[in-house]
Amino acid sequence: MRYFHWTGFLLLLIGLAACASDPQGPGDADEGVDVVVDPALQPVRDSLPPFEEGGPVRPVASSQYGDDAFQADFVANEVIVRAEESALSDFLAEWDGEIVRRIEPDGEVDIGPSYVVRIDPTASQAPSLNESLLELSPSAKGRLRVSTQQGVDLIAAAAAVTIDRVKADLNWLASSHEAVTFEGRVTQEHESAPGSYDNAFDKSYMQTTGNQRTGVGDAWLALERAGRLNNKVTIGVIDGGFSINNDFPASVQSFAQGILSNGLDVPNPATCTGGSPCPWHGTGSVGAAMGLPNNSYGGAGPGGPVANAITVLTQFTSGSTQWALGRLASRSFVINMSFGGSYSGTWAWWTIDDYAEFVRDVFRNGNFMVASAGNDDVNVDAGESPGDDPTIHAPCEFVGVTCVGALKNATSDRIDYSNYAGSNVQTGVYSDGTVDIYAPTNITVGEYPNAASTNTFGGTSAASPFTAGIVALIKAADPSLSFFDVRNVLIQNANTGSGDPDVDRWVNALDSVLAALGSDSPPRLDLKSPLAGATFDEDASIQFTATVDDLDTDASQRVRHQVDV
């Protein structure tokens, strides 16, 4: 379900929830949410780096609603506020607040500012958190465990502010969505014998034939024959751990928050699925989206021939993600986000509302956002109803985000760890479920620092940028296409017919590009003989043999014809 709330929708939701029968949440509280401090609940990271050199520590607390729910971490002395000037001033005065980041897009983008504010959550006497949660989320029942008293105080402060109608989100943490493995690496192309490096056209995830049928290589050829391969499309990558190698586009712009300079050669500050380290995750995302083909190096990504790159290194909080989106909204058409978090929608929807609204505003600006579905093997729409989403998977579920699951190697089945959408989902505006489309994973990408080989970049972290690269190919085929046009081309021309009931559709670059080109793609002619380097006697007759493939023909009727001259 596409998760969103409007500010004015708050009272309506509370009223509906109060009139509905109360669903039993996890735990055993009779009324409302039972909030307890539980030091045994530990965050993945104790703190985040300061915003400025020598600045105060940014402590992290953890929360869990019910014993079996996802653990969710947040910055324990920060809130994200969107408010008018006068209300903002009153809030800062009451809570001893300090604005540490203004979140506002660059350029001609009409999205109002939000503020990351450092507060002392004990500066003003907040009402009981239990009472506040009963008012904000009256249907929520059960136990909310929080790792520290400071974390409880921070949630109480945010709840009190929100009840006073000043929107205050928590600054939630997220993790990268790579299923980390350090096995299965292949030899670096540039270290192989001349001519022995991998051919991108031979990769199962690039071919028109086989089980995945993505047709990336043939999509490149179709663009080349139509004279569109020089149409550049900028792909923005929000991630961590960027180290430029030979597979990056020639021109790379980079941004970073705080004291991190331009964000290059800074290891990923977040962990990957299961808490595993993945220091060069952003390098993998760039390679899977737009690794350069035909350079005898590393791997290749679908968008490689057409893409420019902008990389933004963040601290993987909801606030820093909004800041990064603000940097990219006026600079790139496609934005990839190979990360996410899972948060309780039963009690905490109001703590992520500004994040959802900001993403929706970026979508309204015309940006094509792509996000990974996650690697927890869960139905992201489980338990949803029109008024409730028990677990919010962000940013995957937000309005305007195309959420991507991962396919098993060389098949059209879902890989076992990929999140998925169930058959009983709430139909959204743009899809039949939250996981909109699937794409290959385990993509060969160029080397990471201090590595002796190329790397296999996996997880839904790879499927998402692979899809972003295909989106760039569609846009290159016809630069006049809007978000809606490109989205329709991607979805309507996707492959279908997987034997896996979880996979409704998966990416088809060739048919998508041909649909965007219309009738502008001429037939392909592949010369089979004579081979390059052949010599002939003067005045001798020469026999030419070639195959002709008309790519404008429907894929099911496409036939190669041999022509002898």
Image (cartoon, grey):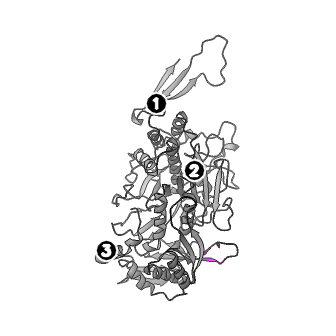
> Circle 1 is placed at which residue position?
550
Q: Are marks 1 and 2 in contact (CB under 8 Å)?
A: no
From mark 3 to mark 2, how far is it between C-alphas? 43 Å
Is 463 included in the stretch rendered in magenta?
Answer: no
Q: Is residue 72 above or below residue 443?
A: below
Residue at the farthest top position: 539
> What is the three-letter code of the residue carrying label 1?
Asp
Discs 3/1, front: 3
Label 3 element class: helix
- The foreground one among 271 and 465 is 465
From mark 3 to mark 1, how far is it between C-alphas? 57 Å
> Circle 3 is placed at which residue position?
16
The residue located at (35%, 84%) in the rendering is 31
| Region rendered in magenta | 41-58
The earlier-in-sequence mark between 1 and 2 is 2
> Circle 2 is placed at which residue position?
234
Quarter occupied by residue 67: bottom left
> What is the three-letter code of the residue carrying label 3?
Leu
Q: Is residue 257 left or right of residue 154?
A: right
Q: Is residue 530 above or below residue 456?
A: above
What secondary structure prevails in the magenta region? loop
Q: Residues within 10 Å of mark 2 (few under 14, many from 20)?
A: many
Q: Is residue 82 visible?
A: yes
Relative image position of residue 371 (x, y in whole percent): 50, 58
Q: Is residue 557 left or right of residue 182?
A: left
Residue at the farthest front position: 86
Q: Residues within 10 Å of mark 3 (few under 14, many from 20)?
A: few
> What is the three-letter code of the residue carrying label 2?
Thr
